[in-house]
């Protein structure tokens, strides 16, 4: 059975849509060491990974950024969750799909 004791958000920028009941931490998910350090400190049972860049008109930049975040960043999240003992990882293809 899951009981919610706290909600934390790890994001590239945490200035918007803040909730006073949550804690916020800034981190680039491609920074594996920082991400692992945060997860070890926070000790979450569940991680919900929705990170993805937004669309842009610069195709080359977009492809490189999408690979960095969606491939390399997701690999970093998976590995950090495994090393930090996270019990469950929920992955969506992109937060922009559900917003």
Image (tube, grey):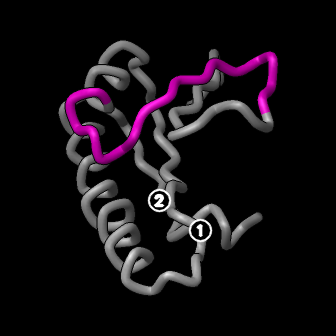
Is 31 one of the magenta-colored residues?
Answer: yes
User: Residue 95 at what x, y percent from top left?
Assistant: 62, 61
Image position, residue 15 (x, y; %): 71, 31
Residue placed most toward the observer, 77 or 53 = 53
Q: Residue at x 26, y 29 (%)?
A: 36
Nearest to N terminus: mark 1 or mark 2: 1
**In this figure, which residue is indicated by the disc labeled 1?**
54
Mark in the foreground, 1 or 2: 1
Q: Nearer the viewer, residue 44 or 22?
A: 22
Which one is in front, 23 or 62? 62
SS at mark 1 in the image: loop
Segment colored magenta: 18-34
* Residue 69 on the magenta span: no
Q: How many residues crowd around disc 1 within 10 Å: few (fewer than 14), some, or many (20 or more)?
A: few
Mark identifier at residue 91: 2
Instruction: Choose top left, top right, bottom left or bottom right for residue 70.
Output: bottom left
Q: Toward the viewer: 58 or 77?
A: 58
Q: Is residue 55 above or below residue 18?
A: below
């Amino acid at each position: 059975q899951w009981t919610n004791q706290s909600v934390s958000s790890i994001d590239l920028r945490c200035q918007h849509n803040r909730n006073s009941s949550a804690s916020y931490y800034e981190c680039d998910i491609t920074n594996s060491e920082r991400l692992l350090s945060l997860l070890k400190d926070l000790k979450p049972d569940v991680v919900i990974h929705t990170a993805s860049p937004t669309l842009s008109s610069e195709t080359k930049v977009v492809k490189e950024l999408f690979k960095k975040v969606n491939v390399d960043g997701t690999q970093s999240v998976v590995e950090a969750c495994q090393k930090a003992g996270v019990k469950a990882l929920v992955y969506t293809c992109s937060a922009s799909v559900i917003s």
